[in-house]
Amino acid sequence: MLAALAGPLVAQTSPQVSNDLTVDMSPQQYRICNDRPARPTWMDEINPREAYKAAALMELYEIRAWEEIAESGDCGCETRFPAWDSSDGEYHERYAGLSQAEHSAFRRDWIEVRKQLEPSVRTICEAQGNW
């Protein structure tokens, strides 16, 4: 009896299911700086077992951008989200051939650097509306 009474309630609160399998290919929208440069294509095509390499490059990219923000005092979109060329080149020159364990060690170091930079970068970017 309880099941019979709960049925209509469940039907009223269940999410609507759609058969529409259309993929939305519209560009991703961000809260700030929507004209960000595209990531290097190899990051999207990498074997999942080597995803640590893409994660390392993303970490390096953010650190280099944050270092520039802290040094220049500018948090414009071009500084916050620069072209990937410099970071990608540095990554391939210095880190691409390293083992996964070595990548992990570098990422831990970069995370510490980011923690040190965050207070000043956050202050600069909040003042300029790009946080």
Image (tube, grey):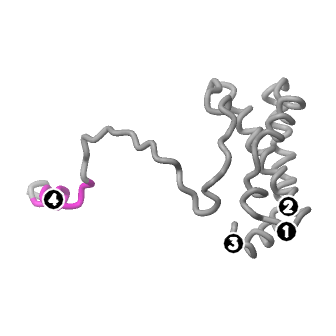
Alpha-carbon span between mark 4 and mark 3? 49 Å
The residue labelled by disc 1 is 120
Alpha-carbon span between mark 2 and mark 1? 6 Å
Mark 3: few/some/many CA within 10 Å (<14, 14-19, 20+): few
Q: Secondary structure at mark 1?
A: helix
Sequence-earlier tag: 3 or 1: 1
- Which residue does the image show at 69% across and 72% down from the upper left? 129
The residue labelled by disc 4 is 6
Sequence-earlier tag: 1 or 4: 4
Compared with residue 130, is residue 39 higher up or lower down, i.e. above or below? above
Residue 12 among those drawn in magenta: yes
**Residue bounds of the magenta highlight:** 5-15
Q: Quadrant of the C terminus?
A: bottom right
- Which residue does the image show at 75% across and 63% down from the upper left? 76
Alpha-carbon span between mark 1 and mark 4? 55 Å
Mark 1: few/some/many CA within 10 Å (<14, 14-19, 20+): some
Report the magenta stretch's main SS.
helix
Instruction: Give amino acid for label 2.
Output: Leu
Compared with residue 42, is residue 33 higher up or lower down, i.e. above or below? below
The residue labelled by disc 3 is 129
Mark 4: few/some/many CA within 10 Å (<14, 14-19, 20+): few
The residue labelled by disc 2 is 117
Sequence-earlier tag: 2 or 4: 4
Residues under numbered marks 2 and 1 in contact, where contact means CB atoms less than 8 Å apart: yes
Q: Position of residue 35 (x, y in %)?
A: 63, 53
Instruction: Give amino acid for label 4.
Output: Ala
Q: Position of residue 45 (x, y in %)?
A: 62, 27
Residue 55 among those drawn in magenta: no
Instruction: Give amino acid for label 3.
Output: Gly
